[in-house]
Amino acid sequence: MNSTRTIRAISYVTILLPAVLISIFPLIVMISTSFKTSQEVYIPPPTFLPRQPTIQNYFDIWTVVPLGTYFRNSLVIGLGSALIALVMAVPAAYALARFRFQGKRIYMLFLLAIQMFPPIVIVLGLFRLVAALNLVDSLLTLILLNAVFSLSFMIWLLMGYFGTIPPEIEEAAMMDGNSRLGAMLRMTLPLSLPGLVAVTIFGFMNGWNEFLFALTFIRTQENLPLTIGLFKFVTRFQVHWHQLMAASLLTTVVVVILFMLIQNQLTRGMIATGEK
Amino acid sequence: MANVICRQLTKLYGDTLAVKAIDLEVFEGEFLVIVGPSGCGKTTTLRMIAGLESISDGEILIDGKVVNKVEPRHRDIAMVFQNYALYPHKKVYDNIAYPLQLRRVPKDEIRSRVVETSRLLGIEPLLERRIRQLSGGERQRVALGRAIIRQPRLFLMDEPLSNLDAQLRIQMRREIIRLQRQLGITTVYVTHDQVEAMTMGDRIVVMRGGLVQQIGEPMTIYNHPANRFVARFIGSPPMNLFDGVLENRNDRLVLCTGFAEYALPAQVQARLPSTHLAGGAAPVVCGMRAEDMTVDLADDESDNHALGVVDLVEPLGSDVFVSVKFGEEMLLARTAPDLPLRETQKVCLKLNLAKMHFFDPKTEQNLLR
C-alpha cells in the first residue's frame, strides 16, 4: 500500500515538476529582472539572479510613465465591466436555471457560440460601430465591450450555481410571504454569494487583462489601461526591461491574487453546469 | 381554519395531463391525506392549492373565494416540503421567525411566539444553531415550526416524513397528528405511503394517473375499495386478487375459482348486481384480505375450504404471513403466530366469504353495493 503510494507520488512529481518549471520560468525571470539595475540587464552573459538587488525600479516606474493613470483606468474598466455584466448575467442565469421556455436550448447554444468568436474577427465591425456612436477613445467603450465578452461565460457559470440551490427554498420563501422576486433576492442571491463573487472577479480579470480592444479604441495617454500602458517602457531606442518587468509584475500580482481567491468557485461552478 | 374546494381542477404539462379534472373538498379543520403512487398527480394538486403551480383549468376555492390567480403569499397557507426547504443561511430561530419578520410583527411578539412554538415542538435548545448542525428529525421539526408559527388557515404537507428513518417516521407521524388535533388547522397531507394515509387522515383521497379513485374515511376505503387499484393500494399486505366465475345455479350464485367452488351466502348475493344473476356465468376478479382467511391444519376439503401447499412463512412476531399455493394461484393469509407451519406443508384455507370483494374484470370497479 505504502510503496505504491510512494511510487505514485514520485511519478507525479517527475511528470509535473518540469511542466511547472516551464510554466513559471517567465514569471521567475520577470521577478528577477525587476530587481536588477539597467546596466545589469544588458551586460552579457545574462545573470539569473540580480547581482546587486535593488527596489529602485519599483519607485521609478511611477514617474517614467503615468502608471498611476493606467492602473486607475484598468480598475475602472475591470470593475465597470464586471458589475455591468453581473447585473445582466444574474437575471439571465436565473431564468435559465429556473424556468422552462421556448428556445431555451438554442439560447444556451447561442451563448456558447458567442464565446467561441475570437474578438479579432469582429474588431473591424466594432470599430465602425463605435466610431459611428462617437465613442472612440472612451473608457465606456471598453467597459461595455468587456462586459459583453464576459457575459456569456458568467451566465453559464451562474446558471450552474443557481441550479444547485433547491427551488423549494424559494417556494418556501414565497409561501412565507415573499413575491417571486423577493424570494430570489432574499434567498437565492445570498445563497449564491460565492458564485456571484467568483463571476464578478472573472469579469474583472477579463477587463483587466484585455488588450485588443484597448489597443484599437483608445487614443490618448490618459485613457490607456495597463495592458497597453506597459508598452510605454518600450521606447524607440531602448526597451527598459528592468522597469517593464517591475510594472508587469505589479499588473500580474493583482490577477494572480484574485484568481487564487476564486479558482475553487470557478471549478465548482463549471462542474455544477456540467452536471445539468 | 378554512375549507378548500377544487372544481374540475386540471393541470397540463405540455401535452401531458398531470391532473385530470378532479373534484375535491377539504372540510374545515379536517386532516385530509392524498395518497397514490408516484406520478399520480397528488403533489401537483397540492402545489396548485399552494399557488406554486399554475392552474390549467378548473378552479380552487378557499373559504368560498376563487384563488386561481392569487399569489402564494396572499393565500395564507403554510407548507412543509419533502426536503424541508429550510433557509441554510439563517439560524433556527430566524427560520421559524421568518414568516413573522416578513409581516413586520413586533420583535417582542416574534420572540415570544418563536419560544412558544419551539417549546411545542421540543426544539427550544436548538434555536441558536445553524441548519446544517441539525439532524433530519430536528430539521423536520423546524420546518413544522416555521409552518405553524403564523397560524395559517391551511397547512399543506408534501411527503414530509419520507426522508426520515423508519423509527423516527413513526414518531413524527404521531407528533404531526397530535399537533394538527391540538391546533385544529385544516391540513392537506400528500404521501405515497398508505400506512401514513390510514393512520393520519380523517379522510383519504386515493389518486392514480391524475384521477381521483376514491375519497372516504380510512376504514371505509379499506373495507369498501371502489375498484381493484384501491383494493391493492390500500392495506398491507395488498389484497389478494384472483380470477373466478360466478355461476347461477337455481338462483344461487356459486363462485368457481381455479382451486375451489363456493356457494355465496345470501347477503353477499344480495349486494351483487342482478345482472350477474341473469346471465349463465359471469367472470369476476375476487378480492380477499389476508386477515379474512384462516389457515387450518386439518385437510378436510369441505365447503369454503381449499387445499393448498404452504409456499412461504413470514413470521412478524405478532402474527404470521403465510403464502399458500393453489396450482397457479398464490394467496397470502395472516395467521396467529402459534400455528406450527412449515413450507411445502399441505394446509386448508378457509375464506370468509362475507368479506369477499368482487371486481368487474373490464371496468375494475367494485361490484358490491
Image (tube, grey):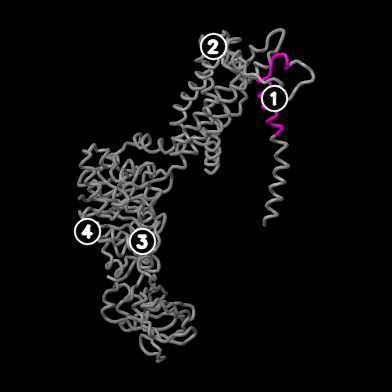
Hey, which quadrant is residue A237 in on the image?
A: top right
Q: Specify the amino acid type for callout 3.
A: Arg
Hey, which quadrant is residue B290 in on the image?
A: bottom left
Q: Chain of mark 2?
A: A
Q: Position of residue B360 (x, y in %)?
A: 37, 69
Labels 3, 2: front one: 2
Labels 2, 1: front one: 1
Q: Specify the amino acid type for callout 2.
A: Asn
- Left or right? Give the position of A232 relative to A158: right
Hey, which quadrant is residue B264 in on the image?
A: bottom left
Q: Specify the amino acid type for callout 4.
A: Arg
- Left or right? Give the position of A105 relative to B355: right
Cβ–Cβ below 8 Å for labels 2 and 1?
A: no
Structural distance between the alpha carbons of marks 4 and 1: 77 Å
- Left or right? Give the position of B112 relative to A214: left
**Do the residues marked 3 and 4 share a common chain?**
yes
Vertical relation: B326 (above or below) B285: below
In this figure, which residue is indicated by the disc labeled 4? B181
Q: Which residues are magenta?
A: A21-40
In this figure, which residue is indicated by the disc labeled 3? B169
* Disc with the residue nearer the chain's start (3 vs 4): 3
In this figure, which residue is indicated by the disc labeled 1? A29
Q: Chain of mark 4?
A: B
Q: Chain of mark 1?
A: A
Q: Residues within 10 Å of mark 3 (few under 14, many from 20)?
A: some
Q: Position of residue B84 (x, y in %)?
A: 37, 50
Vertical relation: A156 (above or below) A12: above
Q: Specify the amino acid type for callout 1.
A: Val
**Do the residues marked 4 and 1 share a common chain?**
no
Labels 4, 1: front one: 1
Q: Position of residue B63 (x, y in %)?
A: 20, 47
Residue B321: in magenta span:
no
